[in-house]
Amino acid sequence: MNFKKITALGFMGTVLSLGALYFWFWASPVGINNYLNKFFFQIALRSPESATYLGLIENTMLDFHSGKLDRYDRKSEIEFLKLVRETRAGMDEYGPEQLEGQELMSWRIGRWLMDDMIRELSFEHSTYRINQIGGIMINTPQFLTDVHRIINEKSVERYIARLHEFARVIEEVKVRIINDRDNGVVPPDFVINGALRGMRSFIDGGLNENPLFSSLPHRLDKLDTITEARKQELIEQAGHVIAAEIIPRYVAMIELFVSLLPRSDPHAGIWRIPQGEQIYAARLKSFTTTNMSAEEIHQLGLREVARISEEMENILSGEGIIEGSVSSRLRQLMDIPEYHFEDSDKGRAEQIAYLYNLDDKMMKMAQRFFITIPSQTLKIVRVPEFAQDGSALGYYRGPAMDGSTSGRFYINQKDMSDTPRWTLPTLMYHEGAPGHHFQISASHLIENLPLIRKVSPFTAYVEGWALYAEFIAHNDMNVYEDDPLGNLGRLQDEMLRAIRLVVDTGMHAKRWSRERAIEYMLSNSGTTEADATREIERYAVWPGQATAYKVGQLHILKLRSMAELRLGDGFDLREFHEMILMNGAMPLEILTESVQLWIESQIR
């Protein structure tokens, strides 16, 4: 056979293989896993930002996305809703009758997720698109400085392209906010004022102090494949886009928000907007992945607040701190200067070093309690100063799936007295190991399951696990054996999550005022007024999300108790954790069935 025939046959074979692959995976996917993976990739194709977070094809020949940002216009939202509805309708062709085991579980998880997405997307005016803790004016700058990877000249050019895109995104969101306003949705006045502070802080220092510009020279310093002259040229191009396209649009958005103030009011609950009660019911279902009503969640919170208060009383009394209420005694401890890191650059660096040390110690213990030990690195960094006024004390952002970017734990260092040393261990265990970073990094190691089960889109599972991680640090790892104040810090954090059940439902279902919710938190937690205010204002713009932590943790603890009871001496904590973590995130009702199946397999 001559060379031309061999080449022709080889080409035909490649075409046939690609055609078969196209039909097997895309045109008519074979099996539920391929069907769900197709949906996952359709989302990524529509969302350049999601594709960058995943990191699977970033800066490769297949990179179609890293010079673009997502679309935020109503037309794109309608198109996405159409895609979800069509994909959901197609699920019935793949199950559930002929499925079993992991495939049946994947089908049920996918169905739940799509039904939830449809339910949420059906409300056109249901959120405050820009607020004091999030929205594109905060999230996009952080995405560009912390997530967009700069590794060569092309990736710098794509960064500049994304700066152009950011101007387009601001315009699209501005149109949506005006449309929301015209349909009766204007944020509460305290939310508008908080958003204004953040936007003004972002542009107050001019171009040279703007993080989109000021962070770039340092990032380019690491590249030795670009000449200094070319680096300077790229920096100047970025500066021009920021000065000419982005900063003026921040000014315009500030003007729009100022114009919204006369139309606003001080009410905190989502009930204040059209369809508010229906929106809140949908959010509770989405975030808790249960059918619990607002009243059931409220009563659960009250019971948990009372229980945790008793445990805190026992520790305080044992330490000889007996004068005043639990919250007043916590407040006294919070104010003792010897527990504070210095309010300086040196003190902030020492606090981050302390957090790294806690994480290192925890990871050294991990093999005694877990089977799969993820190796993804964790960076601990300060919350950006332009976002710190409205930010929580800490939050986490996961690593890329390919490991090209680390997980990040952001610690709010605006006021160092907010985080005494004894409050930090439990925060570290929640955000790092064995909490968020451990769980999300472990999910990236899951094999033979659809990608959608690796991305943890279920808040009750993810936050429930992180709060459960705080529990096992105490209950199983005994990290507070010689540290009663550290354990008090754990209980204070758990109290915060119990309070959330009460105040979230209080504001959004029972029409509590912002001030009443703040007072309830202060009277039960011992936190600072500034921190309580930030927390309550966060719940006002994120209805239902705060209820997921305690609902999820208590559910995992209930499942663990069930397994311990059924298996007796045969219960293995490492195996239990492996089963919870290495099946990926899922709604709590499906997690219950997963644990029940695991128990039966252990008995057999």
Image (cartoon, grey):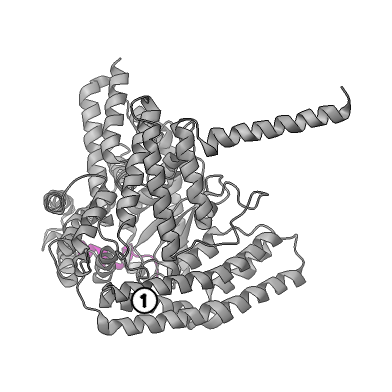
**Residue where numbered disc 1 is placed:** 178
338 drawn magenta:
yes
Which range of residues does the magenta coloring cover?
A: 330-343
Q: Amino acid at mark 1?
A: Ile
Q: Secondary structure under badge 1?
A: helix
Picture coordinates of residue 338 (x, y %)? 32, 65
Quadrant containing the C terminus is: top left
Picture coordinates of residue 320 (x, y %)? 15, 55
Instruction: Classify residue 263 by image quadrant.
Output: bottom left
Q: Are there few (<14), some (14-19), or many (20+) residues within 10 Å of tag 1?
A: some
Picture coordinates of residue 420 (x, y %)? 32, 62
List the single residue furthest toward the top. 604
388 drawn magenta:
no
Instruction: Please give the name of the residue rendered at 40% of the width and 52% of the height, measured from the top-left corner.
Output: 82
- 302 up-or-down from 450: above or below: below
Instruction: Please give the name of the residue rendered at 29% of the width and 48% of the height, measured from the top-left corner.
Output: 483
**Is residue 419 shown left or right of residue 140?**
left
- Depth check: 224 or 233 in front? 233
Picture coordinates of residue 259 (x, y %)? 33, 84
Q: Can residue 487 be spotted in the picture?
A: no
- Depth check: 47 or 499 in front? 47
Q: Can residue 15 be spotted in the picture?
A: yes
Instruction: Classify residue 454 by image quadrant.
Output: top left
- 80 up-or-down from 166: above or below: above
Quadrant containing the N terminus is: top right
**Is residue 184 shown left or right of residue 443?**
left
